[in-house]
Image (cartoon, rainbow, N blue to C red):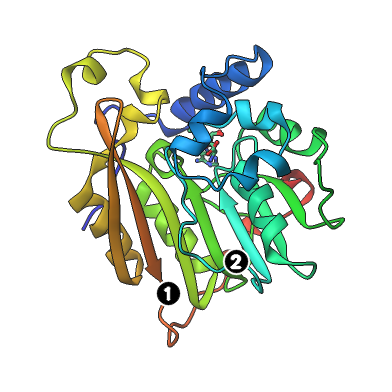
Amino acid sequence: MGSIAGGSGRRDWPDEIKERIRRRYSRLIEERDFPPGGARRLLDAGYPPAVLDRLPEELIAAYRGCGFPLAGLRLAGIRFAVDLGCGAGIDARWIASEMGPDGTIVALDMTLPMLRMLTRLPDRHALPAGSVWPVAGDMEHLPLASGIADLVVANASFNLTVNKTAAFNEAYRILKPGGCLAVRELVREGELPREILEDPLSDVTSLGGTVTEEDLRDAVVDAGFIDIRITGRQPFSCVLSVQLNAVKPCTATTPPMPTSRRPGRSTQ
Ligand SMILES: C[S@@+](CC[C@H](N)C(=O)[O-])C[C@H]1O[C@@H](n2cnc3c(N)ncnc32)[C@H](O)[C@@H]1O
């Protein structure tokens, strides 16, 4: 199967589109352009109420996810997790607070103001030092070593990637054999609705990047994942939010990280 690009079919200038996505998400943070609803949005999305006690209000306001990607997962005892397209970092900080003192989570995003917000805001309950590592990077070319993660999480970010095949291949590469993928993602039913197709900004929104559930599953199968489950379908604007869980086979051999992508000074 070929690479799956974004849903609107106009994602033919990858760098240009990524730059526009970066600008859009930077502006949302810099102008405090947060959706209304605050804490209520998280509770409605399925987050446990304890999230409201543990995380700063401003971080909660900056949430841009499409559901709670961690339902049913046992986080205690996880040693190394990665949140791809972490945004301001709600999920990363929640995971860090649940993992226990030996756990570490890499919170990766390509939009620097998002990462700055993640690091700037204090916790009501301080996390162990060094438990959240913010990393500036592209989900399609991860500056992370192969076979290191027990858990890879993403919330409403695969839909923004220009090349979803590359992004799922990278998630697979950084997982340990037996490691889990837990993703909350948007999918479309059939063609993209007209209101998205006619929106000139749709390439830089989560809605414009949606593919069908079948294409999403194919990308995950092609990357090598097994035990793929797509559940929890919920209406989200004019598309659907779904929960995707999958596992990297215990027997998998992981290709090494390409030399050109080994982290240098630019990855922090
Ligand atoms: C809809 S927001 C979701 C943020 C966060 N996961 C949440 O639940 O609040 C999508 C995030 O993905 C990031 N993103 C989009 N494409 C990316 C890519 N190729 N690599 C890394 N981050 C990306 C954006 O910068 C943005 O912060």
Residue 7 seen by the camera: no
Residue 39 screen position, x and y as percent: 58, 30
The quarter of the image holding the N terminus is bottom left
Mark 2 — residue?
A: 75
Looking at the rendering, which quadrant does residue 86 occupy?
Answer: top right
Nearer to us in this view, 118 or 233: 233
Furthest-left residue in this view = 190
Residue 165 against residue 240 in the figure, above or below: below
> Is 28 left, or right, of 233 in this rendering?
right
Residue 263 visible within the image: yes
Quadrant (top left/top right/bottom left/bottom right) for the C terminus: top right
Q: Position of residue 21 (x, y in %)?
A: 50, 26
Please tell me in which quadrant of the rendered image residue 249 appears.
bottom left
Number of numbered discs on residues: 2
Task: Say above or below: 36 vs 152.
Answer: above
Circle 1: residue type: Lys
Q: Is mark 1 within 8 Å of ligand 1?
A: no
Report the residue marked by disc 1: 248
Q: Residue at x 30, y 25 (%)?
A: 237
What residue is rendered at 58% in x and 14% in y?
Answer: 33
